[in-house]
Image (cartoon, helix red, strand yellow):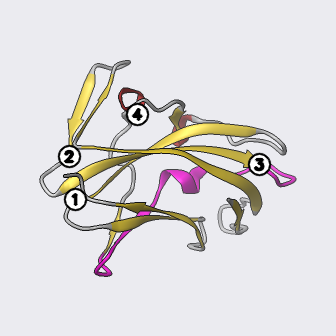
Amino acid sequence: MPVVTSTSDLLDIPGGSADVTLVSVKTARTVSDPDTDSTATAEPGKQFVCLEFKIKNTGSTKLDTYPFSQADWIGADGEVQSAGSPLTIECEDLGQQGDLFTNLPNPGPGQFVRGTTLLLVPNTQSGRIEFSDREGVPLLYVETHPLQ
């Protein structure tokens, strides 16, 4: 899916463009990081959603990938919550590849990164995770459904 990010004059970040591929979506109540021996369990009424993306920079300057590490969740009933990354556990135990986007370099023109984003969203209703650029312009969304 092609996306275009806005220029952020405040942070002196140029706009960019990219082809974004959602490689996989995994949901879980518990996630573990074998590298650090840490485990996290979602609080009641919540679930973890781990998204694996491949992002290829199609622009002419380095691409700011920060927007793919922060998101909002919008419920089917219209409720909006921050789905920001609650911790720094990677998604390897769910079978996904790549580091968290917060740990990856910004790709230059023609380059790509493959990374994951771990988010905490409600488990009480269907909704969608919406990623926006630093100016608040929506880039893409991913549907979510409660774990059974």
Amino acid type, mark 3? Asn
Residue 99 in the image, given as x and y percentages of width and height: 52, 32
Real-space Cα separation, disc 3 to disc 1, in angstroms: 33 Å
8 lies above or below 148: below
In primary-sequence order, the first of circles 2 and 1 is 2
Q: Furthest residue to the bottom? A: 78
Q: Which residue is mark 3?
A: 57
Real-space Cα separation, disc 2 to disc 1, in angstroms: 10 Å
Give the image quarter of residue 113: top right
Q: Which residue is mark 1?
A: 123
Amino acid type, mark 1? Asn
Amino acid type, mark 4? Cys
Dot 4, how many residues are within 10 Å of its Cα: few (below 14), some (14-19), or many (20+)?
many
Dot 3, how many residues are within 10 Å of its Cα: few (below 14), some (14-19), or many (20+)?
many
The disc at residue 42 is: 2
In primary-sequence order, the first of circles 3 and 2 is 2
In primary-sequence order, the first of circles 3 and 1 is 3
Q: Furthest residue to the left? A: 44
Q: Nearer the viewer, residue 12 or 35?
A: 35
Q: Is residue 70 magenta?
A: yes
